[in-house]
Amino acid sequence: MFRYRIRTFVLEIVTILAVVVLLAPFWVLVMTSFKQGQEVLTSDAFAPPKQWTLENFKTLLSPSSTSSSAIFHGLENSLIITAGSILGLVVFGSVTAYALVRGKSRWTTRSYLLFLIAIVLPTQLGVLPLYVEARNLHLTGSRIGMVLIYTGVLLPLAVFLYAGFFRTLAPEYEEAATIDGASPFQSFVRVVFPLMAPATGTVAILAGLIVWNDFFTPLIFLNGSSVQTLPVVMYNNVGALVSQWNLIFAIVLISMVPILAFYIVAQKRFIQGFAGGLKS
């Protein structure tokens, strides 16, 4: 029987305080993006606007604005690169993890350990040789190049997440499909992969957050090209807007909307993924 104790009360207070602290920057971001320029300088950062306005967003997104085309172009590039990277990670991550988990040879275990080591190693250690090879293959400054780079860099994470789920899946599902005449490929596509929906949701959201918010990689590999992602466009606009914090925060809020919408849509799968997801 549940009893409300002092320890429970303390935990609730700590949780509420933690939520308030974590949401405070987001509150300031939203409030400032709807304030007028003069009010930003004279009012408290946490105070709501005295007069709500959409002029900041109109200024940034109006066709006559110099930043409008850059923002929409950056949004398009980020969407294409993020979607392509997620697709590559789901396809190659699931197949690779399935082969490593169901494989019975020694190399499967050793290969899986290599993937685990790759998760621990900082990505920045391999930026220089990766950039040299990408330049030699003419992959720098292109969306396809960024998709391939992100797929390769985040593949160990996708394999790790998928492998954990495949281990919880009883092999009887595949055996039943084989008895019905399905090939190993058909068994994976029609039986195993649909059962991995929670893992796919987890991989998609984590990879989407990482790719969408990444600033360092596109700054290096897309430098000087016309294919700039939204974080790089934001960085360039922050330099141009100087201290117009209402416009700066408005463009940050614009960049958050797509990935927040994606998380809201896929959060059920994400929660299932962290909760264990699959029940035989």
Image: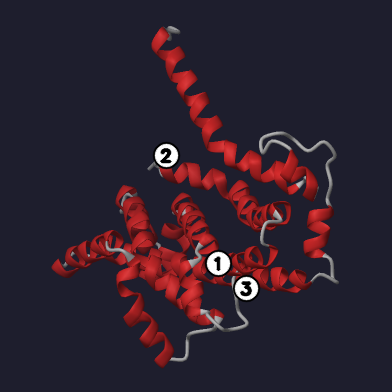
Separation of residues labelled 1 and 3 (CA atoms): 8 Å
Asked if labels 3 and 2 touch by Cβ distance under 8 angstroms, the answer is no
How many other residues sit within 10 Å of disc 1, few (<14), some (14-19) or many (≥20)? many
- Name the mark nearer the viewer: 2 or 1: 1
Q: Nearer the viewer, residue 204 or 64?
A: 64
Q: Is residue 149 left or right of residue 246?
A: left
Residue at the far left: name it. Answer: 106
Q: Which residue is mark 2?
A: 275
Separation of residues labelled 2 and 3 (CA atoms): 33 Å
The part of the image, by quadrant, that contains residue 233 is bottom right
Q: Which residue is mark 1?
A: 82
Is residue 51 at least partly visible in the picture?
A: yes
The amino acid at mark 3 is: Asn
Residue at position x 67%, y 71% in the image:
76
The amino acid at mark 2 is: Ala
Q: Is residue 222 left or right of residue 56?
A: left
Q: Secondary structure at mark 3?
A: helix
Residue 106 spot, x, y in % from top left? 14, 67
Quadrant of the image containing the N terminus:
top left
Residue at position x 30%, y 70% in the image:
125
Is residue 183 at least partly visible in the picture?
A: no
The amino acid at mark 1 is: Thr
Q: Is residue 1 above or below residue 104?
A: above
Q: Nearer the viewer, residue 189 or 48?
A: 48
Residue 185 spot, x, y in % from top left? 40, 70
Q: Secondary structure at mark 1?
A: helix
- Name the mark nearer the viewer: 2 or 3: 3
Dot 2 or dot 1: first in sequence order is 1
Q: Is residue 50 above or below residue 226?
A: above
- Name the mark nearer the viewer: 1 or 3: 3
Q: Which residue is mark 3?
A: 77
